[in-house]
Image: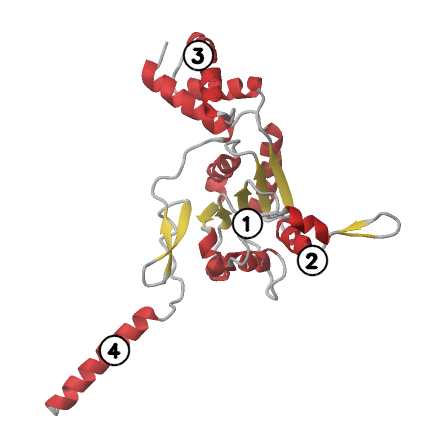
Amino acid sequence: MNPSFERLLQRAEALIDRIEAVLPQPLGEPDWGASIAFRYRKRSNGHGVLEPVRHVATIRLEDLKEVEGQKERILRNTEHFVQGLPANNVLLTGARGTGKSSLVKACLNAFADRGLRLIEVDKAELVDLPDIVELVAARPEKFIVYCDDLSFEDGEPGYKALKSILDGSVSASSANVLIYATSNRRHLLPEYMKENLSYTHTADGEVHPGEVVEEKISLSERFGLWISFYPFSQDEYLSIVAQWLSSFGVSPAAIEAARPQALVWALERGSRSGRVAQQFARDYAGSHGPVV
């Protein structure tokens, strides 16, 4: 072969390899047996991958206190889903640190042995949600696509992708996929006072939201199940503190003695949330050790 022609072929092959490296690639399947939870990530070359979560949070449903009503609703929905019965996409909203994300993780642990799996997707990657759904559609497991602390600013591309998957795409949603999302915003988008001016009033007093408001409401309305969380009272906060201290091996007598310190801790943090209760319990148990 002519040496010049051979060099030309080598350069052409190298150029093809470089082009293929930047072209969109189909989403590959992970090792489904490596974990019960996966994260969707974009590599530096723009290719998406599902990464097994090696150390899944071990939180249990019984660890979560003072959210019995919310727990019952999400358990019932997840039970239906795992059984192959009709179930709803879920939006968990409300006060920060009240157990929204912990409840989703606890549900995963409760139903993992029955085939439930979780895929965590950041809002920036929601544009690839159709590819993820297509990848798992033929799998025997049931998948929760989990979006934590979800909120959008105007114009973000993930908003329309999620809206389409929830309800509105020409293709039917997969029977083995549900969306569970947590947010501090009920409508997932920022709301401004000026938008109230877009409301219209009829002669009989009926109120109609304007197009801007309708658009912001439309996404959250596509979640079939809304579960709301509220700030804890002092007694509820102390009950959660006691639960966490007990889990760290602190004796009942020491738990009772820790109550004043737990209240001061919450006062300093400006919150009586479940997260603050856990943080206090960690600090107290770490400082005092298992008190028996």
Among numbered discs 4 and 2, the one appearing first in the sequence: 4
Among numbered discs 3 and 1, the one appearing first in the sequence: 1
Location of the C terminus by quadrant is: top left
Report if the CB atoms under discs 1 and 2 are less than 8 Å apart.
no
Q: Is residue 167 left or right of residue 60?
A: right
Q: CA distance from mark 2 to mark 3?
A: 53 Å
Among numbered discs 2 and 3, the one appearing first in the sequence: 2
Describe the element under mark 4 as helix, strand or loop.
helix
Q: Which mark is residue 179?
A: 1
Q: Amino acid at mark 1?
A: Ile
Q: Which mark is residue 15?
A: 4
261, above or below 20, in the image: above
Q: Amino acid at mark 4?
A: Leu
- Depth check, mark 1 against mark 2: the one in front is 2
Q: CA distance from mark 4 to mark 3?
A: 68 Å
Q: What is the x, y in percent for residue 249? A: 38, 17
Q: What is the x, y in percent for residue 254? A: 42, 9
Among numbered discs 4 and 3, the one appearing first in the sequence: 4
